[in-house]
Structure formats: structure tokens, C-alpha cells
Image (cartoon, rainbow, N blue to C red):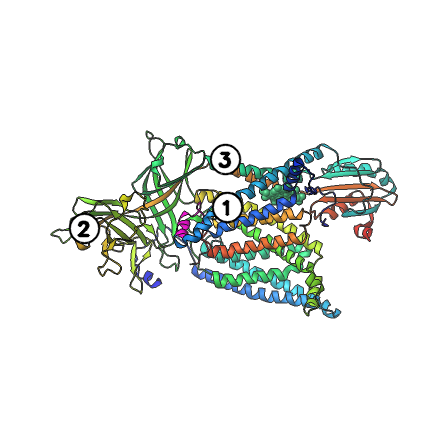
Amino acid sequence: MDSSRPSDHVSNEANVVSPEIGVVGWLRWIWRSLTSMRTALILLLLLAAAAIPGSVYPQRSADPNGVTSYFQQNPELAKFLDSIQLFDVYSSVWFSAIYILLFVSLIGCVVPRAVVHAKAMASNPPATPRVLRRMPAYLLGKAKKAARESIVADAAALLKSQRYRVIVDADSVSAERGYLRETGNLLFHVSLIGVLVAVGFGGAFSYSGQRLLVEGDTFVNNLAGYDSFSPGAFFNENNLPPFSMTLDKFEIAFDNNTAHKGNTGTPIDFRATVSTKQTPSSAPVTSVIRVNEPLELPGTKVYLTGNGYAPVLAFSDKPCKALPSGVRVIQGPFSYQGAVPYLPQDSNYTSLGVIKLPDAKPNQYGVLSFFYPTAGQLPTGALTSIYPAAISPQSSLLTLNVYEGNLGLDSGIPSNVFSLATHGLKQLSGGKTGVPAVKLYVKGNAENLPNNMGCVAFTDLKRFASLDIDYNPGQGWVLLFALLALGGLILSLLVPRRRVWVKRTEDGVEVAALARGDDPALERIVKEIAEELGLKATSSKKEADA
Amino acid sequence: MHNLLSALPNVLRSQETVSLNDDLSQVSLYFIYAAMAVYTVSFLAYVWHLSQASSTVKKVRKGASRIERWAFSLLIASAVMHGTGVILRGVAASRVPWANMYEFSITGTFLVVAIYLVSWFFVRDIRILAVFVTGFVLLVLGIATTVFYVQVKSLMPALQSYWLVIHVTVAILATGFFNIASAASIAYLMKGSKVVETSKLPGFALTRRILALFPDMNKLEKLAYRFNIIGFILWTFTLIAGAIWAERAWHRYWGWDTKEVWTFIIWTIYAGYLHANATRGWSGKRSAWLAVIGFCAIIFNFTIVNLFFKGLHVYSGLK
Ligand code: HEM
């Protein structure tokens, strides 16, 4: 046993002896091994090690797109990794096994400890040991004759005033304080169980849904209203509060001071102004959602998690019409009309949009389109955005690469609205086709599509916001238990638990102390008690050892 | 790219005022450089002190404590410059100076030095660890000014929260305590190493004499323990504060983001360390190893995870 531990240190180690014969013996042995300190320690270290792969491989819960692209890049390896749950580490069988064992061990540990502690609290400190000299802090002193007479009573009074629990016999005082240390330790461990239970229950009743809203659009809180939705195991659709929310406008403030080298164009603030109706019949209330400032509604919170541009486009199978003024306009009927959310590709909001036109005549076509809020040209000639906002209508450029062919939308396989599978389609403009990409400016002239396929116009520029609608009834409890754990931890690490003895012997008066765990103050305490009692030290621990 | 930007017309009139002072941040950088220069001298003086104090010649040994006083004065001088550099950086950016890796490094190392200097007056045993502390601080500052350096930037919206102040301050403090504890554990392991104890190879005799200047193993172990428990309490708080912030900024309190994963791993390793201290056969060397591994995980979390792992915490400010 190491020197910093007193010999009475109540270690929870079971004596793991070889099992008695028989099932009961085996079970008892397994239980004892499981609840031993060493097992707890090894399980803790295993848990740390088992958490590592989750930071190396993309996780379905945190980064589903990462998993998808991993599958695309290394299909064979991905299949293997998936078979041992490396894309779902934190819900995997092996990770769960470790923490469940750890918590079983924890319960097996805490319950008997709590019983021992309750008994210790209810009983007196143990009697003074015969030999005090070996205690980690020790002092032998001389008292004046009168003081020597009353030393036991004086010491008892002194220690009581210092909040020690004291028992007195003919020649000695035995005192103990710091029961809070163990109480704190138990509180800490029990609170960890609380955290785990609250995480589990909270997760089961929770839900988390995502919805992308273009300015002017309205979201209604039912399952059909979500782009993606992940419910907990006990989620019940009827519990979705019946609110609806309209994105009135979305604003971004960028640092637009060109003197700030390297900072110009950095976003300073994202603001989504929404009007919310708590029920279909209630009056709309306007509020602002910002990053770090979710909107709290009864039963849910709405968070702002992303944003981008949504150019409003119109497509027609008819050619554009040139007006006498020289302006070109689009003429209906439209094969597509509406705002298209473009996903930002870089910090200057060079954005990529996909439009699919299954109803176009005579052939279906798809469009891969880039939007540059403030277009500029790289030395290579490639287009790029040099500022994340449109500084003028003439600055914001939209280009379209048109792909003709069967879009495969009728096959029944759900397809991602943000990507166009160009395989099997014929590219008609942009890239290596030799035909320049169609270029449009916001509210500018409409343009004809290649091969006389029709006309396209860029009629307005809107923004979109990605919103997360979340509910987790457990999180308040998780926080409560986590704070209790923190409090317990502070008590258990910082409250000194110590025993102090004062004993009248033939050589003089002995003062000794013993701590549970590390106690930097131990020797000082012994000295101070001796001083308070008016003792003159004749030998201390070091000399006694020698 | 910057040429392109200078062509931007003057339509960009500021509505939101961002106050950044590039000149002042340059001055801050000069202070950091100056501090590094003086840290270097201080470090060398401490090395010199060790070599003198471990000398076999009595007269040489006697002169050592004067060198130590000089080294300490230099350490204080560099800490003052370092602190000035950190504060100026904050003033230049009009916010707390720990929003990217460069700033986190200069603030973090400053706190390490500050914790060391404050403890210096209360914990005698810590004085001899100065070589570790100055050496570590120099190394980090060297990397910070060369690899991590970025100009002052405004805060991205996700970072605009008072939790940046609470969560990150406490994380840096925890790191400082763990850092000093790991120095004690390394000294402990070196002292306890069989190789160091018995090898006849040249150099080991000197190492032994230098190690003899350190407190005995028992004291080193306790020293490490005391700093580690403070570090652990602060780290536990960091974890909780991070979860509270994540709930506001990322819509869930815990999502196993890479940074969250590593914060958890570090926490678990140190919980293992505390258990090891109370487990037969694990206290002593094994627990000291766990403390060192825990600190390595912290460094890993700050460097490799920040720079190369994908996650939501992409605040290094580097491209
Ligand atoms: C979720 C798993 C666990 C965690 C995170 C954890 C964490 C901790 C921490 C941080 C301490 C330090 C407090 C102190 O030293 O007083 C501690 C102490 C302790 N833990 Fe655990 N623990 C866990 C499971 C267990 C289990 C399973 C056992 C029983 C086998 C156990 C028994 C103890 C004991 C006896 C102490 C006191 C050590 C001492 O006297 O210094 N713990 N634990």
C-alpha cells in the first residue's frame, strides 16, 4: 500500500480469491470481481479507449454525410467497419457493454459503501490506538502540571469547537471530522447514475427535426413538415405541439469594412425573424432567432443552424421574348418556378444549386447552377465569389450548366434534392461542352437555354434558414445530476477527512493525526493543536521515526 | 484574393461596427516575441542552475542559488511581457483573447506561468519544476507564433456567447493545472526509473545528480495529485459548461462531436487516475503514467484534433 494512504483506508477492493466450487460460489466470485476497484479502473480506461474510434470514423449520429461519402470512397472497407459498428460507436454493442458493466460495478460499489458510511456516521470515532507514534503526523510535547491534569478535557473542548466528533476516555481523546468527504464521494457516484438514467429517458422521449425555410415560407409542426426527423424510442406524434412558423426575413451582418485585412466579409450576426402561431387559431407573434439564442416555445425549442441563398428562378419551354426596349423577359407557362435553396460552398457563399425539371418538354433536363453573391475572377479565369453578400444587382451572378436526359425521378428510389446524378445525362452548357454556361443577373434579362430548350429568368434573390426543432425532456435532469456530481466531487476531493488523537502518556502528551487520502495540512494541524493546548514540543514525527 | 477585394466599391458602408486594430495586434505580437526571448534566457538560466546545483564541486553548488534567483527574476519579467501581449491582443480584437488556436495558446501558456508563479510562493516543492514549465511554455509559444498565427478577427456568431468566457477560461485553467501536475509526474517517473537509477552510461550520473535536486518521490506524487484534483474539478466543470453551451449553439447538449469525444476521453482517463491512486497495485508508477497519458491526450485534443479531425469545433482560424 502506498505511503500516502493511511492503513485504515477503506478500499473497496474485494479479496479476489479463487472461487469456491458451485454455481453460487462462481456467481459470488464474479460479482466480487466486477465490483472491485481494479475492475472499475480497467473499465474506465477501456471506456476511454473505446471512445477513440468514434472520433476517427464519421458517426451516423453526428455526421451522416461523412458516413455516406466514406461508403462511396471505400465501399469494401466501409462495409467491414460497419459490421463492427464503427460508424455507430456510441450506440454499439461493445461500447454499451463497457459502460453498462461499469455502471453495474458502480452500483455494486456504492450500495455497500453507503451502508458502511451510514453506520460510521451513526457511531463514534474508534477508540484511540495504543501506539500513536507511527501515525503520519505526530508530536510529543510537555505540558505544565496544571494543564496536564485537564489536558483531556481541554483537548476534547478544542476539537469539538473545530467541529470534530469526539470521544473521551481516561487518558485520551479520539476525534474525527470530514464525513462530508465520503458523503460527497457517494453523492458523486450516485449522481453519475442519475446522469445516465436522465440521458436514457430524455433520449427516449426526445425528438429532433430539421427544416429548411426560404423567406416567406411557413413550417407547420407535423411529421410532414420536416425535411428530416429523428424521434426517440418513446416518441409519440400526438405530442408535437401544433405551432406554425413563417420565416419573415433572414438577415446577415458581415464585416463590411474593407480596411480589416483578412476579416472583411466575416459574418458578425445571423438573424432569422419569424412569426409563430402557437395554435392554428392563435395570433402570430414575431420573434428573432439567432445562433446561441434559440426560440423557446412550449414543448420545443427552435434553433438556427444554417443559412444560404435561395435565388428565385423561372423556367419555360418557350423561348424568351424580346421587348421593344431591348429587355428580354420569360413567358409562361413555366415548367418550374420558385425559390431554390443553394448550398454555400465557401465562406464567401459561392453556392451550388440543383434544379430538376421532370415536366420540361420535349425532354427532361436538370441544371447544376452556381451562384456568386459578388462575382470575381481568379487569375485562372475561374469564377469565384469575393464577398458573401450581393453588393449590387450587377455583382451577383448565377451560372447554369444544363444536363438533358432521363432524370430517373420515376424509378421510385428517393433522390437527394441537392445533388444531380449527371451520369447518363448529356451536358449542353458549361464545363467542357464549348457552349458557355448560361449567365443570369438578379432581376436582369432572361436568357435562352441551349438547343432552343426554352428560357430561364432570375427574378428575385431570397435567403433561407436551416432550423432545428428539438425537444428533450431529460436535459434539465441531466444538468441537475451533473451539477450534483460536480458538487459531490468537490466535497470528496477537497474536504479533509481526518482523525486526531490527544493522549496523556508517561513521556508527556502525544498529538497525532491520520488522514483519509491526501491531506497537505496534516502536520500543521497537529502543531496547531499542540500550540492551542499549550504544549512544548519535545519530539516530532521525524525524530520519532528515527 | 485580396487584390480582388480592394476593387470592391465603396458601397460597403458599415452598419454593424466591428472594431479591430491590426496595428495594436502587431504590438501584441512584439510583446509575445520579447517574452519568448526572455523565457529562453530564463530557461537556459534554469538549466545552468540545475547543472551547477548538481555539481560535485561544493563551491560551484554554492553559486547555484544566485543563478536560480536570476532565472526567477527573468521568468517574472517575461511573464509580465507575456501578459501584456495577451491583454493587447484582447484589446486589439475587442473581445476575450482566446477565440482561435493562436490566442488560446498565448493565453493558455500565460495562465500556466501565472499558476506556477502563484504556487511558487505556497508550494516549495514546485520551484524545481521551473525548467519543465519554461521549456513547455517556450515550445508552445514557438509553435503558436509560427504555425497557429492568425490576424485579429471578429467572432463568428457561434462563438458570441458568454459561455466562451466561462467554458474556455475554465478549460485553460484546468489545462494549466494538469500541465504542472504532469511535470511532477514526469519527474517522479524519471526518479523511479530503474534505468536512470542503475545505468552506468555517461550522462546518467549527471541525470541522477540533477534528479536528486527534486523533491523525493513521495512528495512528487502528492504534488501531482494535488494539482491533478484541481485540474479534474475544473475539467468536470468545463465538460458541463460545454454541454450547456452546445445545447444553445448546436441544439443538443451532447452529440459526440470529435471535440466532445476527446473531452470525455480526457475526463475518463483522469477519473481512472484518481481510481488508480486508491487501487492496490496501481498507485505510484501506474497512476503517474495515467497522469502523463491524460496530459498527452489534452495536447492531442488541442493540436491534432483541432487541425485534422472533422467536427463542429472548427475554430482554429487556420485554413
Ligand atoms: C462511471 C464510472 C466511474 C467514475 C466516472 C468514477 C469517478 C471517480 C472519481 C472522479 C473519483 C475521485 C473522487 C475521490 O477520489 O474521492 C472516484 C473515487 C472513487 N471511486 Fe469511482 N468512478 C466510477 C466508478 C466507480 C466504481 C465502479 C467503483 C467501485 C468499484 C468506484 C469506487 C470509487 C472509490 C472507492 C473511490 C474513492 C477513492 C478514494 O478513496 O480516493 N468508482 N471515482
Q: Are marks 3 and 2 on the same chain?
A: yes
Q: Quadrant of residue B64?
A: bottom right
Q: Compared with residue A535, is residue B199 higher up or lower down, i.e. above or below?
A: below
> Mark on residue B242?
1
Q: Residue A436, position in %: x, y?
A: 22, 59
* Residue type (three-letter) at the residue carrying disc 3: Phe
* Marks 3 and 2 in Cβ contact (< 8 Å): no
Boundaries of the magenta span: A58-71
> Mark on residue A4?
none
> What SS does tag 1 mark?
helix
Residue at the limit of the structure toward the left, as seen here: A324
* Residue type (three-letter) at the residue carrying disc 1: Gly
Q: Residue B172, position in %: x, y?
A: 54, 52
Q: Compared with residue A236, is residue A511 higher up or lower down, i.e. above or below?
A: below
Q: Quadrant of ligand 1?
A: top right
Q: Is residue B311 magenta?
A: no
Q: Chain of mark 3?
A: A
Residue sitting at 37 percent across and 50 percent down?
B16
Mark 3 to mark 1: distance in Å?
A: 21 Å
Residue at the limit of the structure toward the front, as seen here: A22
Query: Which residue position holds label 2?
Result: A455
* Residue type (three-letter) at the residue carrying disc 2: Cys
> Mark on residue A201?
3
Q: Are marks 3 and 1 on the same chain?
A: no
In this orientation, does residue B170 appear?
A: no
